[in-house]
C-alpha cells in the first residue's frame, strides 16, 4: 500500500506541473488581464504548498457551488459585456482549474484537471501569436504523457515496484520505471507531431483574420493615429513591441532612398494639434467585393492599383524613366493594431492582399475595411526612385504635373489662428524670398537638424503655442516638434506642406532578410508639394540609419528568436486554405515531374523492348528461331533471373538473421543482467582487435583461448591481469551478489582503459 501512495504523490506533483504549464501557455499569449495573472500567481503556489503539507480539505458542496457561481459569472460576462468570447472562455477555464487545484483531490478530480489543462492549451492555441506557444506545446505533450502514465500505474495499483524509504529515486527498479516513462513520453511526442502535421496540412482552416481583429480586437495600440497633440505627447516611452516585419531582398537594400514606412498624413493644425482632414478617396476594387463583410469564410487575395503614374509626364518634367529598378516590392507582416492603416515604403502604387476592398484617401493613405483589423500579410510595390535635386530645385509649386486639385493645395497651406510672427521671422532669416521651394525646404531641414537637439522627455509650459516654445526656448524635442516646426515655416513661405506619420526601418534581421519595426521606431516627417510631387524631408536629427555592425552574442540570440517568431507567424499562423491549395498544387506539380522522368526512363525501355519483340516476331516469320527454341531461351533467362534473386535474398536473410541474433543476445544480457555491462564492454574492445567470443564459449574458455592465442612476447602482466580481473568479476556479478562501491567501480574503469591501451600499444589485430 505504501508503494501505491508514493506513486499517487508523484502523480499529484505531475498534475500540478501539467496545470501550471497549461496556464503558462495562456499567460504567454499576453491576452489575460491583471486579475487573472494575480489569481494564477496567488492560488498556484499556495495551493501546491498546502497540497504537499496535506492541509487541503474536500467539501464537494462548496466546490460545486463555486463552480456554478463561476459558470453564471461567465454567462453574464458573455452576454452583458463586450469582451471577446474567446477571452471569456479562457477566464472560465482558468477559474475552473484553479478551483479544482484548491481543494483536496480524488482520482476523478485528477482526471478533470488533466482534461481542463488540455482545453486551456487549446484556448491558448487560438490566442497564441508567438513561437513560445510551440515550446509550451512540446513540454505539455511530454508532461501529459508522463502524468497519464503515472495515473495509469496508480490506477492498476502496482505493488511490484520496490521503494527504498531513504533513497527512493536511486533504486534500480525506479530508474527502470523512469526510463520507461521517458521513452513513452518521447514516443508520444513523436506520434503527436506526425498526426499534428497531417492535420495541419490536410484539414481545412480559417484565416487568422477571423479571430484577430474581429473576435479578439487589436493586440497592440499602434501609437499612430489621425491626431498628433504636441502637448500631450511630451513623453514618449520606448516600447520594443513589434509592429510589423518588412521583408526585402538583400540585394534591394542598397536601392532604398529613404527608410520611411508611411502610414498617413496630417494636414489641419490649430496651433496645438495636427489632424488628418480630408475626403475619402475612391475604393479601388471590383464591384463584386464591395459588399463583402467578415464572416467565417475564406478571403481570396485581391490585387489593387493604388496610384496610376503618368510615365510620360514624369519623364518630361523630372527625367524619371520608370522601369523595374524604379520600384521595390516589400512583403509586410503586420501585427494586429488598433487602426486600419496599411503601411509601406512611399509611394505604394500596387497592393496585393487578402482583403475584399481597400479605401484610398486623398493623401494616398490606404485603409482596410473596418472588420479587417487583425494580423495581415500583404505585398506592396512602391516607387522608390526620386527626381534629381537639380531638377527639383527648378520647380515651383505651380509648375510641373497637375496631379493635385486646388482644394488639396489650399488645405495644406492653412495656418492656425495664433501669433506666428516670431516663427515667420525665423523662417525669413533662414531662407530668402526668391529661392525655389526645394531650396527653402532643404535649408529649413538643415537648420533644424543642426541647431536643435532630439529628446524624448519634454515638459511644455506654453500650452497655446508649443511649436514656438520649441524653436525659441527649449530647443529640444522629438520628431513631432521638428516636423511641426518645419511644416509651419514652409506654410508661412506659401509652400504646401503636411506631416507624414509612420515608422522608420532601423533593425535588419539577416537570418530572415527583413526589417523588424517596433513601436519605438514611430516617426514623423514632412511632405512638401513641389512641381506636382510630394517630396519627403526629415528635419529631425534622430539617427535612424541602420547599424550594419556585428551584433553581440545576446543580440544574435534575440535575432534568432525573432526569426523563429517570424517563421511561426508566416508559415504557421498564416497557413490557411489558400496556402493549402498552393501546397497541393506544388505536390501535384512535383509528382507530374517525377512521372515524366519515369516515363522518359521506362518509356524508352518499353519502346526498345517492344521493338525487340517485333523484330523477333518478324524473324520467326522469315524462318528464324522456332517457337520451342524461343521458349527454351526465354525460360533459361527467366530461371537465371529467379536464381539470382533467390541467392541474393537468401544471403541477405542469413546475414540479417545473424545480426538480429547477436543484437537479441546482447539485449537479453543487458535486460536480464544489468550488472555485467563492463564485461560486454570488454568483449566489444576485444572484437575491435580481432578476438570474437563464440556464443557457445564460457567466459573462462574464452579467457583460456586468449591466453593461448596471444604469444608470450605480447601478453604482458598488465594485459593478462586485466583479462583475468574482468572475467572473474563477471562470474561474481552473474552468479553472486555484486555490490560495487566507488573503489571497485574505479578499478573496473581502470582495467578497461588499460586493456584498450595495451591492445593499441601492441597493435594486435
Image (cartoon, helix red, strand yellow):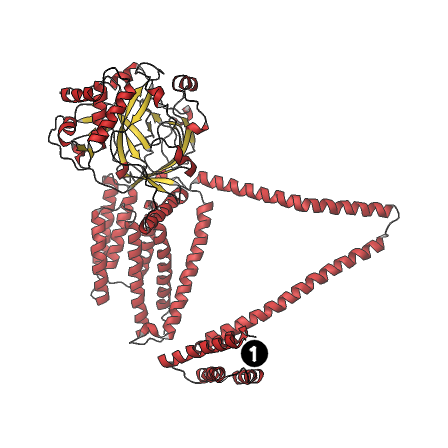
> Label 1's element?
loop
Left or right placement of residue 139 versus residue 522 in this view = right
Residue 333, percent from left and from top? 36, 38
- 483 or 663: nearer the eye? 483
Give the tally of numbered discs.
1
Left or right placement of residue 492 versus residue 116 in this view = left
Report the residue at 29% width, 22% height from top.
Answer: 528
Quadrant in the picture for the C terminus: bottom right
Residue 500, percent from left and from top? 28, 28
In the orientation shown, which residue stands out farthest toward the right? Answer: 623
Query: On the image, which quarter does residue 191 sit in?
Result: bottom left
Report the residue at 32% width, 35% height from top.
Answer: 373
The residue that disc 1 covers is 695
Q: Is residue 122 visible?
A: no
Left or right placement of residue 460 versus residue 336 in this view = left
Quadrant in the picture for the N terminus: bottom left
- 651 or 218: nearer the eye? 651
Query: On the image, which quarter does residue 336 sit in?
Result: top left
Residue 365, percent from left and from top? 32, 27
Q: Is residue 97 visible?
A: yes
Amino acid at each position: 500500500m505504501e508503494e501505491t501512495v508514493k506513486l499517487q504523490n508523484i502523480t499529484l506533483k505531475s498534475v500540478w506541473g501539467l496545470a501550471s504549464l497549461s496556464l503558462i501557455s495562456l499567460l504567454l499569449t499576453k491576452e489575460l488581464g491583471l486579475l487573472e495573472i494575480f489569481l494564477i500567481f496567488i492560488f498556484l503556489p499556495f495551493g501546491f504548498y498546502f497540497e504537499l503539507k496535506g492541509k487541503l480539505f474536500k467539501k464537494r458542496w462548496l466546490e460545486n457551488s463555486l463552480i456554478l457561481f463561476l459558470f453564471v459569472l461567465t454567462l453574464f460576462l458573455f452576454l452583458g459585456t463586450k469582451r471577446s468570447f474567446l477571452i471569456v472562455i479562457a477566464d472560465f477555464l482558468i477559474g475552473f482549474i484553479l478551483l479544482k487545484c484548491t481543494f483536496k483531490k480524488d482520482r476523478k478530480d485528477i482526471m478533470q484537471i488533466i482534461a481542463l489543462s488540455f482545453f486551456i492549451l487549446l484556448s491558448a492555441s487560438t490566442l497564441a501569436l508567438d513561437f513560445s506557444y510551440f515550446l509550451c506545446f512540446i513540454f505539455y505533450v511530454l508532461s501529459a504523457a508522463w502524468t497519464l502514465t503515472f495515473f495509469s500505474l496508480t490506477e492498476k495499483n502496482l505493488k511490484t515496484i520496490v521503494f527504498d524509504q531513504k533513497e527512493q529515486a536511486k533504486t534500480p527498479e525506479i530508474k527502470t520505471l523512469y526510463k520507461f516513462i521517458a521513452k513513452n513520453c518521447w514516443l508520444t511526442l513523436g506520434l503527436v507531431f506526425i498526426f499534428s502535421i497531417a492535420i495541419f496540412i490536410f484539414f481545412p482552416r480559417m484565416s487568422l483574420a477571423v479571430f484577430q481583429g474581429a473576435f479578439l480586437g487589436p493586440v497592440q495600440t499602434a501609437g499612430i493615429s489621425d491626431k498628433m497633440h504636441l502637448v500631450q505627447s511630451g513623453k514618449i516611452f520606448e516600447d520594443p513591441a513589434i509592429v510589423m516585419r518588412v521583408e526585402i531582398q538583400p540585394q534591394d537594400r542598397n536601392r532604398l532612398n529613404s527608410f520611411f514606412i508611411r502610414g498617413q498624413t496630417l494636414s489641419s493644425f490649430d496651433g496645438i494639434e495636427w489632424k488628418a482632414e480630408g475626403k475619402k478617396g475612391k475604393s479601388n476594387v471590383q464591384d463584386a467585393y464591395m459588399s463583402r463583410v467578415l464572416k467565417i469564410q475564406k478571403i481570396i487575395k485581391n490585387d489593387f492599383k493604388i496610384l496610376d503614374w503618368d510615365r510620360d509626364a514624369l519623364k518630361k518634367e523630372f527625367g524619371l524613366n520608370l522601369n523595374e529598378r524604379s520600384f521595390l516590392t516589400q512583403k509586410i507582416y503586420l501585427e494586429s493594431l488598433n487602426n486600419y492603416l496599411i503601411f509601406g515604403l512611399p509611394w505604394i502604387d500596387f497592393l496585393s492582399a487578402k482583403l475584399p476592398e481597400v479605401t484610398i484617401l486623398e493623401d494616398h493613405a490606404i485603409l482596410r475595411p473596418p472588420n479587417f483589423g487583425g494580423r495581415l500579410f500583404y505585398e506592396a510595390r512602391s516607387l522608390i526612385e526620386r527626381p534629381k535635386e537639380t531638377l527639383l530645385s527648378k520647380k515651383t509649386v505651380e509648375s510641373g504635373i497637375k496631379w493635385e486639385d486646388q482644394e488639396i493645395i489650399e488645405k495644406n497651406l492653412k495656418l492656425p489662428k495664433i501669433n506666428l510672427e516670431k516663427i515667420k521671422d525665423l523662417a525669413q532669416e533662414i531662407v530668402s524670398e526668391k529661392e525655389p521651394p526645394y531650396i527653402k525646404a532643404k535649408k529649413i531641414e538643415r537648420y533644424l537638424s543642426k541647431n536643435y537637439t532630439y529628446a524624448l522627455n519634454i515638459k511644455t509650459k506654453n500650452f497655446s503655442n508649443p511649436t514656438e516654445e520649441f524653436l525659441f526656448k527649449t530647443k529640444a524635442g522629438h520628431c513631432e516638434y521638428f516636423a511641426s516646426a518645419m511644416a509651419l515655416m514652409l506654410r508661412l513661405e506659401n509652400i504646401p506642406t503636411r506631416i507624414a506619420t509612420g515608422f522608420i526601418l532601423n533593425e535588419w534581421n539577416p537570418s530572415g532578410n527583413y526589417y523588424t519595426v517596433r513601436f519605438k521606431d514611430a516617426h514623423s516627417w514632412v511632405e512638401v508639394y513641389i512641381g506636382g510631387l510630394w517630396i519627403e524631408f526629415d528635419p529631425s536629427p534622430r539617427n535612424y540609419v541602420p547599424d550594419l555592425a556585428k551584433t553581440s552574442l545576446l543580440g544574435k540570440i534575440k535575432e534568432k528568436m525573432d526569426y523563429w517568431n517570424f517563421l511561426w507567424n508566416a508559415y504557421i499562423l498564416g497557413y490557411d486554405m489558400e496556402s493549402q491549395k498552393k501546397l497541393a498544387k506544388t505536390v501535384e506539380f512535383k509528382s507530374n515531374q517525377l512521372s515524366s522522368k519515369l516515363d522518359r526512363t521506362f518509356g524508352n525501355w518499353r519502346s526498345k523492348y517492344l521493338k525487340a519483340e517485333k523484330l523477333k516476331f518478324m524473324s520467326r516469320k522469315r524462318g528464324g528461331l522456332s517457337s520451342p527454341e524461343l521458349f527454351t531461351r526465354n525460360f533459361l533467362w527467366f530461371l537465371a533471373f529467379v536464381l539470382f534473386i533467390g541467392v541474393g535474398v537468401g544471403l541477405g536473410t542469413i546475414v540479417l538473421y545473424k545480426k538480429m541474433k547477436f543484437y537479441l543476445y546482447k539485449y537479453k544480457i543487458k535486460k536480464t543482467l544489468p550488472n555485467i555491462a563492463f564485461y560486454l564492454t570488454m568483449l566489444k574492445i576485444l572484437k575491435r582487435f580481432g578476438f570474437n567470443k563464440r556464443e557457445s564459449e564460457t567466459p573462462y574458455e574464452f579467457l583460456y583461448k586468449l591466453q593461448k592465442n596471444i604469444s608470450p612476447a605480447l601478453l604482458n602482466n598488465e594485459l593478462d591481469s586485466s583479462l583475468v580481473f574482468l572475467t572473474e568479476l563477471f562470474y561474481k556479478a552473474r552468479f553472486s551478489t555484486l555490490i560495487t562501491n566507488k573503489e571497485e567501480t574505479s578499478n573496473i574503469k581502470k582495467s578497461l582503459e588499460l586493456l584498450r591501451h595495451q591492445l593499441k600499444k601492441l597493435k594486435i589485430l
